[in-house]
Image: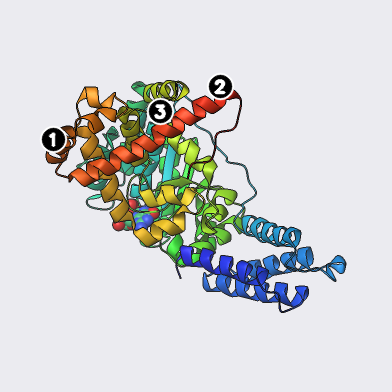
Amino acid sequence: MVLADLGKRINSAVNGALSNSQDDYATTVDHMLKAIVTALLESDVNIRLVSKLRNNLKSKLIDSKSDGRSVSNGQTKKVIQKAVFDELCDLVDCKVDEPFQPKKKKCNVIMFVGLQGSGKTTSCTKLAVYYSRRGYKVGLICADTFRAGAFDQLKQNAIKAHIPFYGSYTETNPVKVAAEGVAKFKKEKFEIIIVDTSGRHQQEQALFQEMVEISNVVKPNQTIMVLDASIGQAAEQQSKAFKESADFGAIILTKMDGHAKGGGAISAVAATNTPIIFIGTGEHMHDLEKFSPKSFVSKLLGIGDIESLLEQFQTVSNKEDTKATMENLQQGKFTLLDFKKQMQTIMKMGPLSNIAQMIPGMGNMMSQVGEEETSKKMKKMIYVLDSMTKEELESDGRLFIDQPSRMVRVAAGSGTSVFEVEMILMQQQMMARMAQSTKAAQQSGNMPGMPG
Ligand code: GDP
C-alpha cells in the first residue's frame, strides 16, 4: 500500500462513517476507528502509536455527551473530521522546533550522514538546489572516498543543478578532502557548504568513527541524517543507533514517494522527537519538500496545501515578471505574454504531481489524467507561445481573430495544429475576461463573480 492509498483509505473510512445513517453514533465512530487503525497498521505504523491514536480519538469523539449525537448533523461531521486530522498530525509531529535556520551572508556548514543507498548524495544536491533557489550561494563537497564513483555521482548531480562542487579522485583521506573543501568555499564566501560523507552497508564502527572525525574538522552548524523511509518503523532503531554515535540535529526521510511504509517511518522517527526537516519525494532534484505535520497530513488526505504552494510559487517566480503581470491585471489586462510567464513559472515549480497535491482536489484529478499527459500538454502550450512574435505576445490576442492566418503560421512554427493554437487563445481570453471583470468589480466596489 503506497502512501496515497493510505490517504484514500483514511478518507473513505471517515467519509463512509459520515454518510452512514443506519447505525447509532457510537457504532459508526467505532467502525470508522477500526478502518483507520487497519489502514495505519498496514502502512507499518507502530502498534503502540496506532493504539494511542485510537484511544485519543475515542475519548475525543465518544464521551458522556455523545449520546443522541448523529453523524448526519453537519457540526458533528466537522468535529469528527477535525479530530481525525488533528490526531494524524500528532502522529507525525516530532514536537521539536526546527533546529537550524541558515543565515544569509554567514557561512553555514551542513554535514550529511547515513547508510549507503539511503539517498544521501541525491538529498545533498536536492538541498543545495533548495537553498540556491532561495538566493543562497551554495557549494557541495564530496567527502566520500570509500565508495568508488561517489565523487563522479556528486559531480554529475552538481553540474546538472549548476552548483559549484569540490572533491578529489586521488585523495583517500575523507577528513582531508572535507577540510580542504570547506576551507576553499569559506574563502570564497559561500553561504551554505554541504558536505556529503560516506555511507556503509550497515552501521559499522569505522563509519561512525569517520563521521566523528569529519565533524571535528568541519564543525558543522547542522548535521543531517538521511533515512530511507521504505524501512518503515525500523527507522526508529536506525536513527537511535546514529544518534548515539553522531549528534545529528535533523533528519531527511527519503523515498516517501510510492513506498507503503512511509507512514510507518515518519511516525517512528517523530516518536523519537527528532525533527524531520524535509522529505524526499522522488529521484528528481526538485523532489524535496519541507516537512510540516499539517502540510503532510493535508496532502495525504487530498485537502491541499496552499501555503506550500504559495511559498514555492514565490521562490521560483521571477519578481520582475510577476510585477509586470500584476500591473497588467490591475489595469484589467492579461496578455499572451503574461500567460506564457505564468505557464513557465508553474513548469519551474517541479513535477506537476507535486504541485497538484498542494491544490485542494487536484491530487486525485492528476492521478486520473496522468503526470505525463498534463506535462506534455503544458510543454506544447509553451512551444505555441514561443512561436509568437513580440507584437502578438504583448497583445490581448484579438489580432489572431482579425487575422486567422497568424494562427496557421504559429501552428506550423510550433509543430502543433490550428485547433491547439485556438485552444490556448481561448484560455488566455478567458483569463483576460476575468482580469477585466475583476477590474470592473473593483471600480464598482462589488465582488467579481466566480469564474465558471
Ligand atoms: P547514497 O548511497 O545514500 O548516497 O544514495 P544515493 O543518493 O545514491 O541514492 C540511492 C538511490 O535512491 C538512487 O537511485 C536515487 O535516485 C534514489 N533516491 C534517492 N532519494 C529518493 C527519493 O526521495 N525517492 C526515490 N524514489 N528515490 C530516491
Q: Nearer the viewer, mark 3 or mark 1?
A: 1
Residue 410's x, y, as percent? 16, 36
Asked which secondary structure carries label 1, the reply is helix
Q: Is residue 245 above or below residue 436?
A: below
Local secondary structure at mark 2: helix
| Other-residue count near label 2 (Cα within 10 Å), few / some / many at <14 / 14–19 / ≥20 | few
> What mark, if any, has residue 442 been given in the picture?
none
User: Does label 1 point to a residue whose CB lies under 8 Å from ligand 1?
Assistant: no
For residue 136, the mark is: 3
Instruction: Say which element carries label 3.
Output: loop
Alpha carbons under labels 3 and 1: distance apart? 43 Å
Q: What amino acid is found at the position of numbered circle 3 in the picture?
A: Tyr
- Amino acid marked by disc 2: Gln
Name the residue beneath numbered marker 2.
Answer: 443
**In the visual, does 152 lie left or right of 17?**
left
Q: Assess disc 1: are there few (<14), some (14-19) or many (≥20) residues with their C-alpha within 10 Å of its C-alpha.
A: some
| Label located before the other in sequence (3 or 1) | 3
Residue shown at 37%/32% (left/top)?
132
Instruction: Give how far across and how far down residue 38 sits, in percent.
Output: 59, 75
Ligand 1 within 8 angstroms of badge 3 C-beta: no
Q: Is residue 424 visible?
A: yes
Residue in the foreground of this view, choosing between 178 and 114? 114
State how far apart marks 3 and 2 are (Cα): 42 Å
